[in-house]
Image (tube, rainbow, N blue to C red):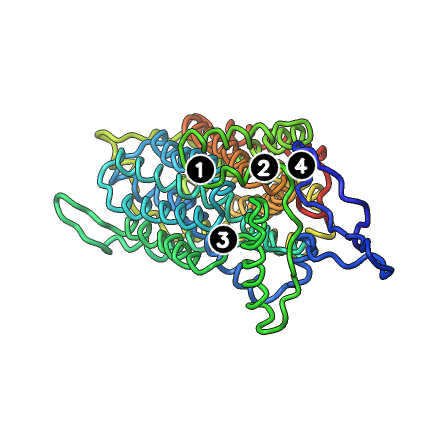
Amino acid sequence: MVDRRPLMAESRFNHDYEAEPLLIENSGGDDGPRQPDKISYEDALKTIGYGKFHVLLLALCGWAVSSDAIEVLSVSFMLPSAQCDLHLTSADKGLLNAIIFVGMMVGGYFWGSLADKIGRRTVLMGSLTVNGLGGLVSSTSQVFWLFLIMRFISGVGVGGSIPVIFSYFTEFLPKFRRGAMISALATFWMMGNIIAAGLAWLVIPHSTLGYFSPDFKYNSWRIFIAICTFPSLSSAFFFMFMPESPKFYLTHHKEALAVDSLMTVHKINHGNKPFQVPGLILTTEKEEVVAEDVNTSSCVANMQNLFHQTKELFGKSLRRTTIIMIIINFTLSFGYYGLWMWFPEIFARVEKYGGSPCDHTVVNTTGTNETEVCNPIPNDWVFFEGFMTALSNLPGNLFTIFLMDKLGRKPLLATSMVLSGVTVFLLPVVKTKIGNLLISCAFGAISTVGWNSLDVLQAELFPTAVRSTAFGLQSGVGRIAAITGNMVFGALVDIHCAIPMIMVAVLLTIGGLSAIKLPNTTGKDIH
């Protein structure tokens, strides 16, 4: 229903960036109020509807999300095999697991702010290219320090694409499809996890595959790393043919370009049917101020823009939401990535020693005793466990797709995090490799519900003008947590792995309880 309130001047500090549709009184006749020549953005999305474009959008953005998952998780699958070639200790493995998150932390904040300034599509193409090239060069690295640097560069690319993909995707969606579609997009992380695990299972065990010389070795785990870069590079290429976000254009006072983007969506959805969006509501005063500097490319201007957007996130209207989301992102990322990146190593230890993964203290050396602890190619059971744990994400993803809009984001997030903490607490207790696999799969299925709920909340809680910056900030916090979690595991796993696991269980529970304080966004317009 059209809101018939008169147009009011909006404060530049008002975060409700959606102006109301206008009804302009006809002052010279008796015909009553005439229909507006501009409609709101949400009404425009509703008019265009849901069709082929949105399926294409889901496929491409999903492939990009999968590429990020593959790049992040591929390292954990190659660590047991790379141990000999790169002379890795447990601390080195923790650093390798953590370094990509260092890059993601840097990239997420930088790229996210840049996407709010120059556009979503351009940043996606750039960040996905950096991701792919960094991973490709890392596969040729023969020494630990060079491999570490290239994984950092790859992480910078991953950190840019993750927050921007969700902003870009969300801004094309009508609100009645938003929850289910964002949940569907989040499932592609599971797809990337499964692809990475499957490729590891198919490629790495072939120890004779590759090129070998006294000075250069390109063996099976390096080939696996190289193959894992294809999704990101192909995603960057296909984004060249996609339109820019109309919501981004509207926020930057470019209504004509916004209408052109919507017209592209309409044409793909409806062919030659008439396009019935005559114009969009003018941007607010605040958005016009942002638009004045949109073409400024100096480093100082970019830093000022970043500072301004970050300040908005901690302003009166958004402060509480921002802080709670920081707590949730930290606890979930510490728990999930701190444990998930170590699953292949845990599986290898269970297979080698039996019993609980915490029953044995492993002294990991790189000196004269290296041959005693170095197992270049783990057996098939280890890769099977990794694949099944990745596949365990499927039930959680299906659950959120069908029930996200019915049960609500907040209840699902809180419940998932608390139950995930319970499963982690049980992990050191199980004594068989089957029990270890079942608990790991339960953790994968339950934690996925939390991640999908968090993705939807992050897309809906923050206004358009600061949405990508908010994603970048929250992602940066998550990367710090992932770095900390992996370093903690690397330092403590050889002492007693129950210690970091109990830490994970407690933090997940704290994050779940914090989620109860978030506002409800189910069925509401995005700003």
Residue topped by disc 1: 296
Q: CA distance from mark 1 to mark 2?
A: 54 Å
How many residues crowd mark 1 within 10 Å: few (<14), some (14–19), many (20+)? few
Lower sequence index among marks 4 and 1: 4
Secondary structure at numbered mark 2: helix
Cβ–Cβ below 8 Å for labels 2 and 4? Answer: no
Q: Nearer the viewer, mark 4 or mark 3?
A: 4
Cβ–Cβ below 8 Å for labels 4 and 3? Answer: no
As drawn, the residue found furthest toward the right would be 30
Lower sequence index among marks 2 and 4: 4
Above-or-below relation of 447 to 11: below
How many residues crowd mark 3 within 10 Å: few (<14), some (14–19), many (20+)? some
As drawn, the residue found furthest toward the bottom would be 272
x, y percent for residue 76: 40, 42
Secondary structure at numbered mark 4: loop
Residue 388's disc is 3
Q: Nearer the viewer, mark 2 or mark 3?
A: 3
- Which kind of residue does numbered mark 1 sit on? Thr
Lower sequence index among marks 4 and 3: 4
Q: CA distance from mark 2 to mark 3?
A: 19 Å
Q: CA distance from mark 2 to mark 4?
A: 44 Å
Q: Nearer the viewer, mark 2 or mark 4?
A: 4
- Quadrant of image for the N terminus: bottom right
